[in-house]
Image (cartoon, rainbow, N blue to C red):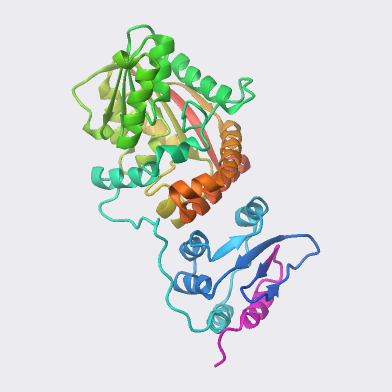
Amino acid sequence: MPFGRPQVLCDELRRALPDRPFRVRFWDGTELEPSGERDEVTIIVRSPQAIAHLLLHPNELGLSRAYVSGLLAADDLDRAMPVVDHWRPRPFDRVTRLRLALAALRAMGITKPPRRPRIELPPRGRMHSIVRDRRAVRHHYDISNDFFALFLDESMTYSCAVFSRGAKTLEEAQRAKLELVCAKLGLREGERLLDIGCGWGSLVIHAAREHGARVLGITLSEPQAELARRRAEEAGVGDRVEVRVMDWRELSGETFDAIASVGMVEHVGEENIDAYAKRLRDLLRPGGRVLNHGIARLRHDMGPSGPFTQRYIFPDGATLHLSRLLLAFERAGVEVRHVEGLREDYAETLRHWAQRFDEHLDEAVRIAGRERVRAWRLYLRGSRSRFRDGDLSIFQVLGRRP
């Protein structure tokens, strides 16, 4: 049987995908043209090992490994996103799948098995145990503080900004979000605030400096905590801010006037959402307020995130539906007072982040390596598409302990 013939695979793909809004260019210059007359995005297959990844895992995992490794690319990621999001080929019958697999083997030729990308984090341990959650969170956040500084605003706020109140810049929109959280919680001088998932300290600093609150922030990332403490001292509120490295399940025996959880509930999971809501209630004084700011799925026909997000960006991340969070609050005895959706605001936030990230690609590669940069360029664009198109939204849910 002849080997190393991409033309054979082109012929089979042409037959199997009569309506294809993309061009495919193989490593030897062979091309599969788009079916229409439009100037479509070009998918670049740089090595036979890309096909090997797809043969080993003919699904999103194989595609993800080929892309993150740099074996598979697109000439323009922004033009590729509509294809990724909306193009759905007709289902293949058994004969077509067999013909494609044989053609892929002939196109690939004899090649060594491809390695898994170095930045991939395979699942290990009991889902959403404290040990596994700590490992997953650190995989995302412990890349480098400098890495996140490349695309975040000067306050290092890593959550949806609020542009819909009139902000024009990312910095203005993040200040608006921080103030919106504090205003909804009705923070007053001397009150004690808990910030769950405090990140690099933007909310704890704002609450202490602008509202006179005494704030405890918790995170699972030691590099985050170190920078948050230093930034609080530099802002002159070090005496009113404490930052600890701990899981939300490890906090007990203390009470707070208000609790903010901003961009953290996505790490909790369906298994723990009821326990999470109950812990928030137990940490509040009677009459205390809680604000949960988190991503939620809008469609009930949409499953959880796939292997790309799970292994390269947010391991074990789980976006639930708004109704599930509200049910958890009700079961815990938290009175829901207000709900606000900020879907368009997050789409705009992600547009700013993606643009800033692209402006610093060389530095990002120096800090985190090419694999991670490839993954993050796709992640930021893919996330923006999900919010823009109405697959995901983000909600601020304000509750109160009676």
Most foreground residue, 344 or 381: 381
What residue lies at 25% left-to-right and 54% top-to-bottom? 125
Range shown magenta: 1-23
Q: Is residue 135 left or right of residue 376?
A: left
> Up-down: is 361 above or below 324?
below
> Up-down: is 370 above or below 113?
above
Residue 10 figure quarter: bottom right
Image quarter hosting the C terminus: top left
Confirm whether the magenta stretch covers residue 369: no
What residue lies at 53% left-to-right and 73% top-to-bottom? 51
Residue 192 in sight here: yes
Residue 358 figure quarter: top right
What residue lies at 59% left-to-right and 37% top-to-bottom? 347
Query: How many discs appear?
Result: 0
- Residue 323 lies, in percent from the top left, at 45, 35
**As drawn, which residue projects farthest toward the left?**
253
